[in-house]
Amino acid sequence: MTHSLVKVLKFGGSSVGSAESLARVTTIIRGEAASCQPVVIVSALSGVTDLLVTLTNSNDPEVVIAQLARRHIELSETVLDSRRRYTYLRTIGGIMDGLRDRCHLPDDGHRTAAILATGELLSAPLVAALLTQEGVVAQAIDARKLVLTDHQGVVRDQTKLQISNWYSDLSRFVVPIVTGFVGSDKDGNTTILGRGGSDYSASLFAEAVGAAKMDRWTDVDGLYTADPNKVKGAGKFLYLLLEDATSWNEASALGMHTEAFLPVLEACIPVHVRSTRFPQGDGTLILPRLLPGRIERDSRRQLAHFNHTTSSSSISDARLKEVQP
């Protein structure tokens, strides 16, 4: 069954870092797929990007690579059946071979980015395999083919066009599991969007596919005035204006990628910060000031389309009756 409502769901590293958290993610995506068309953005498993940072400067890369492979192999053995685990282990092997080759090459200006991108390239196929095993047809998508960057950052117009074209060709029966954090330049070299870049990826995809909403899933139920794990009595925001959240985030007050909200702000898309540990919670709903205008425009467009379709059907029915004996 297909749905017209499109939502972007972004899951951070803590949401995909263990068997328990992956089970929660699977349940959430299955529920969303029953009522909308989800586009899923995933980060690397928790701690993996930090491990890859050590790899960029390691004198003994084989030790770190073995540790990285073991982390994903052990998790796949816990959550995947034998057939899907075999396929995923082959994926791990190919990625490890490429990573090993890159580590033994001199830094050509692209070496570090290629190494750091490995975490998402490993997590997306794992989530896709688990979802398919649980009855949701899913496909891992390498965002390097869709997100274009240059020396100044993401080339927004071209990226939007590439994502839009990709999505228009995507089967509505498939849930895409997209690698966050990564992109490529015009020469095909792997690039990264910076710390917290998966949030930016999700925002870019939400804008390009015309999402009705972007859900940012994490292990904390919303946005707080301070880190609730460190500051006792930190207050939670139930609602925020997206314009205010964007300004605070650009000033590094929210701890997210500084450009994370820009695409959804320009596209007037609400953002919901939610917890995978407490999915029934309120979270924090971040609403664009101009959202009522967008809702009105979208509603009028839908009604006009419905009326046109209904009118066309009525005319066709009338003509059919005219030729019937």
Image: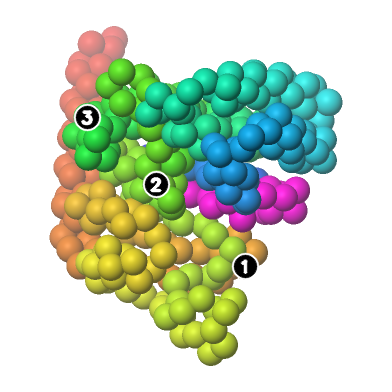
Residue type pointed to by label 2: Gly
Mark 2: which secondary structure? loop
Tell whether 164 sits left or right of 51.
left
Binning the other alpha carbons within 10 Å of mark 3 as few (below 14), some (14 to 19) or many (20 upward) gives: some
Q: Which mark sits nearer the N-terminus, 1 or 2? A: 2
Query: In the image, what residue occupies the spot 58% across and 22% down?
Result: 104
Amino acid type, label 3: Gln
For disc 1, the neighbor class at 10 Å (few under 14, some 14 to 19, many from 20) is some
Q: Position of residue 88 (x, y in %)?
A: 70, 25
Question: Would residue 319 be found to the left or right of residue 204 on screen?
Answer: left
Q: Are marks 2 and 3 in contact (CB under 8 Å)?
A: no
Real-space CA distance between mark 1 and mark 2, rounded to the nearest whole angstrom: 28 Å
Q: Identify residue for label 3.
A: 158
What number of labels is visible? 3
Instruction: Please state the horizontal and vertical placement of residue 86, each as a whole percent of the image.
Output: 78, 21
Q: Are marks 1 and 2 in contact (CB under 8 Å)?
A: no
In this view, the mark in front (3 or 1)? 3
Residue 285, horizontal then vertical, whole percent: 39, 68
**Disc 3 or 1, which lies upstream in sequence?**
3
279 part of magenta stretch: no
Of labels 1 and 2, the one closer to you: 2
Callout 1: SS? loop
